[in-house]
Image: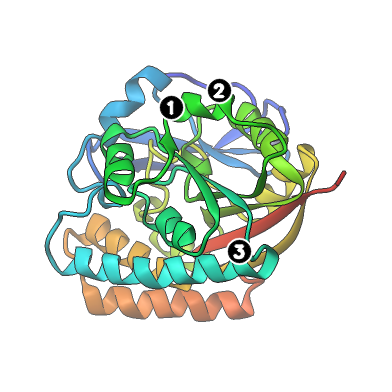
C-alpha cells in the first residue's frame, strides 16, 4: 500500500479522515477516504500499489468488462447502456458531427463501435486485455493498451472521452497533461464521474457503491473537478447529469448495506437522488463534464 502525504489537486499536506469504508465489491478489505483540508478533494488513502491493483479487478462480476452475464441486474445494465450510448453520442454530435474520437477506458467497445458506425474516426484505449480483445475482434476497432497513449499523434483528437475512468487513474497529473496534448486546438474533453456530493452518496455514506474503494482512487464532486482541470488549463463549458446512475448506484449500495438488492427501495432512492439534485445545485449521482482548453 502507498500513503499519499499531499493532496493530488492542490499539493497541500493537511488531510483529515473523511470516511472509513470497505471493498464491498470484492475483497472486503478496509479502506479510508481522506479529505484535503485546503481544497476539499477526497481520495482513497492509503491505496494499493499500482502493481497490486489488478487483483481488485479480478471478478467475473465486473460487468463493464463482460457481456456474458445473465440475470435481471445485468439485463437492466445492458438496456441502460444502450440508452446511455445514444445519449453520449448525442452530446458529441452537438460539438462535432464528424472527426476523430479517442475513448480512454473503452471497455468492450460498444460506445466506440456506435461512433464508428456514424463515420467518426475512432481509437480506444483499454488496459484490460480481455475487454480489449473483445473490442478488436467483435467490432474490428483500433484499441490499444495503456502504453498506446504515448504513441498517439498530438493535436489529433476532436473529442477525448473518459466515461467513469479518471477515478481509476493512478498518475492523474501525467494523464491530464497527456490528454491536453492529444486534443486538437478546438477539441473537447468529456469526463463522466460519480459525484460524492450527491444525495445518494450522503445517504449511503460508507456503503455508497460509487466510493468503490480501492478501484476508485479519487472521489470527485463538482468543485474538485473544476479546480483540478483549471490547474491544467481547462475550462468547464458544460455539465449534464447521468440520471440512470443514481438507480444503479442505489441498487448496489442497498446490497452492500443490507445484503439484499431491495430493488423497489433502490428505485425510490434513485428517484429521490435525482429530484434532490434538481433543487440542490445539480448534485446528481453521476455527472458528465464537458471541458475545453482555455488557451485555444
Ligand atoms: Zn487539496
Instruction: Please give left or right for residue 24 compared with residue 144 in the image.
Output: left
Would you say the residues marked 1 and 3 are in contact, meaning their CB atoms lie under 8 Å apart? no
User: Which label sits on residue 4?
Assistant: 2
Q: Residue 267 shows which numbered tag?
A: none
Residue depicted at 54% across the width and 29% down the height: 149
Judged from this view, the residue extending furthest toward the left is 70
- For the question of whether residue 213 can be seen, the reply is yes
Observer able to see residue 196? no
- Nearest to the eye among marks 3 and 2: give it: 3
Q: Residue at x 23, y 38 (%)?
A: 28
Q: Residues within 10 Å of mark 3 (few under 14, many from 20)?
A: many
What residue would you read off at disc 3? Answer: 92
Marks 2 and 1 close (CB-CB < 8 Å): yes
| Residue 281 x, y percent position in the rendering | 66, 71
In-front residue for pair 207/248 = 248
> How far separated are the C-alphas under marks 3 and 2?
36 Å
On the image, the x and y values in percent for residue 57 come to 28, 36
Dot in front, 1 or 3: 3
In the image, is the residue at mark 2 within 8 Å of ligand 1 by its beta carbon? no
Q: Residue at x 50, y 71 (%)?
A: 87
First of labels 3, 2 by sequence position: 2
Q: Tell me which corner region of the image, top left, top right, bottom left or bottom right, holds residue 238.
A: bottom right
Q: Which residue is mark 1?
A: 47
Q: How is the image coloured?
A: rainbow
Picture coordinates of residue 253 (x, y %)?
31, 60
Amino acid at each position: 500500500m502507498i500513503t499519499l502525504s499531499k493532496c493530488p489537486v492542490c499539493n497541500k499536506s493537511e488531510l483529515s479522515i473523511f470516511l472509513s469504508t470497505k471493498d464491498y465489491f470484492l475483497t472486503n478489505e478496509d479502506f479510508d477516504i481522506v479529505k484535503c483540508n485546503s481544497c476539499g478533494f477526497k481520495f482513497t488513502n492509503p491505496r494499493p500499489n499500482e502493481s497490486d491493483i489488478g487483483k481488485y479487478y479480478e471478478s467475473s462480476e465486473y460487468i463493464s468488462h463482460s457481456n456474458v452475464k445473465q440475470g435481471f441486474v445485468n439485463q437492466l445494465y445492458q438496456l441502460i447502456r444502450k440508452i446511455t450510448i445514444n445519449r453520449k453520442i448525442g452530446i458529441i454530435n452537438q460539438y462535432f458531427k464528424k472527426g476523430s474520437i479517442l475513448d480512454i477506458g473503452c471497455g468492450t467497445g460498444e460506445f466506440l463501435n456506435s461512433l464508428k458506425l456514424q463515420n467518426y474516426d475512432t481509437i480506444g484505449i483499454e488496459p484490460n486485455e480481455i475487454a480489449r480483445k473483445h473490442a478488436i475482434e467483435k467490432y474490428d476497432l483500433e484499441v490499444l493498451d495503456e502504453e498506446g497513449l504515448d504513441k498517439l499523434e498530438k493535436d489529433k483528437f476532436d473529442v477525448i472521452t473518459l466515461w467513469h475512468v479518471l477515478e481509476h487513474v493512478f498518475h492523474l497529473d501525467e494523464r491530464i497533461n497527456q490528454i491536453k496534448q492529444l486534443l486538437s486546438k478546438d477539441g473537447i474533453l468529456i469526463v463522466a464521474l460519480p459525484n460524492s456530493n450527491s444525495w445518494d452518496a450522503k445517504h449511503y455514506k460508507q456503503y455508497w457503491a460509487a466510493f468503490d474503494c480501492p478501484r476508485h482512487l479519487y472521489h470527485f464532486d463538482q468543485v474538485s473537478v473544476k479546480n483540478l482541470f483549471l490547474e491544467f488549463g481547462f475550462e468547464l463549458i458544460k455539465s449534464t447529469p447521468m440520471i440512470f446512475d443514481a438507480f444503479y448506484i442505489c441498487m448496489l449500495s442497498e446490497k452492500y448495506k443490507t445484503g439484499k438488492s431491495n430493488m423497489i427501495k433502490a428505485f425510490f432512492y434513485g428517484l429521490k437522488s435525482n429530484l434532490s439534485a434538481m433543487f440542490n445545485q445539480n448534485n446528481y449521482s453521476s455527472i458528465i463534464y464537458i471541458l475545453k482548453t482555455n488557451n485555444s
